[in-house]
Image (spheres, rainbow, N blue to C red):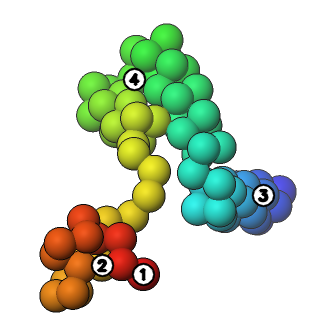
């Protein structure tokens, strides 16, 4: 019974991870809901702040930060 619960939680965690990696908009919605839930449950402050930070994250990467040819293009040369 315990093994089944651990396996289910692991599959759910992996599914959540990949859904947020493949669809950042979905990830923001999930973290926004998680943030509201943690606020309603009076969870520890660090958990609430972490969820709120992930919910308001800006999509998109940092571009090619170390690329010397991208300095005048704002990191959008690729």
Residue at point 44%, 58% (across, down): 60
Q: Which mark is residue 29?
A: none
Question: Of label 3 and label 1, which has the lower sequence position?
Answer: 3
Q: CA distance from mark 3 to mark 2?
A: 38 Å
Residue at point 24%, 65% (across, down): 74
Under tag 4, what secondary structure? Answer: loop
- Circles 3 and 1: CB distance less than 8 Å? no
Q: CA distance from mark 1 to mark 4?
A: 42 Å
Dot in front, 1 or 4: 1
**Percent from the top left, x then y, of residue 75?**
28, 70
According to the image, label 4 marks what residue?
43
Question: Of label 1 and label 4, which has the lower sequence position?
Answer: 4
Residue at point 39%, 23% (across, down): 43
According to the image, label 2 marks what residue?
64
Question: Of label 3 and label 2, which has the lower sequence position?
Answer: 3
Under tag 3, what secondary structure? Answer: helix
According to the image, label 3 marks what residue?
8
Q: CA distance from mark 2 to mark 1?
A: 8 Å
- Circles 4 and 3: CB distance less than 8 Å? no
Q: Residues within 10 Å of mark 3 (few under 14, many from 20)?
A: few
Under tag 1, what secondary structure? Answer: loop
Q: CA distance from mark 3 to mark 1?
A: 40 Å
Question: Of label 2 and label 1, which has the lower sequence position?
Answer: 2
- Circles 3 and 2: CB distance less than 8 Å? no
């Amino acid at each position: 019974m315990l093994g089944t619960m651990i396996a289910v939680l692991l599959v759910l965690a992996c599914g959540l991870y990949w859904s947020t990696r493949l669809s950042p908009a979905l990830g923001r919605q999930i973290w926004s809901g998680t943030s509201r839930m943690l606020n309603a449950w009076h969870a520890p402050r660090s958990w609430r702040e972490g969820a709120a930070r992930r919910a308001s994250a800006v999509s998109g990467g940092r571009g090619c930060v170390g690329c010397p040819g991208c300095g005048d293009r704002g990191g959008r040369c690729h």
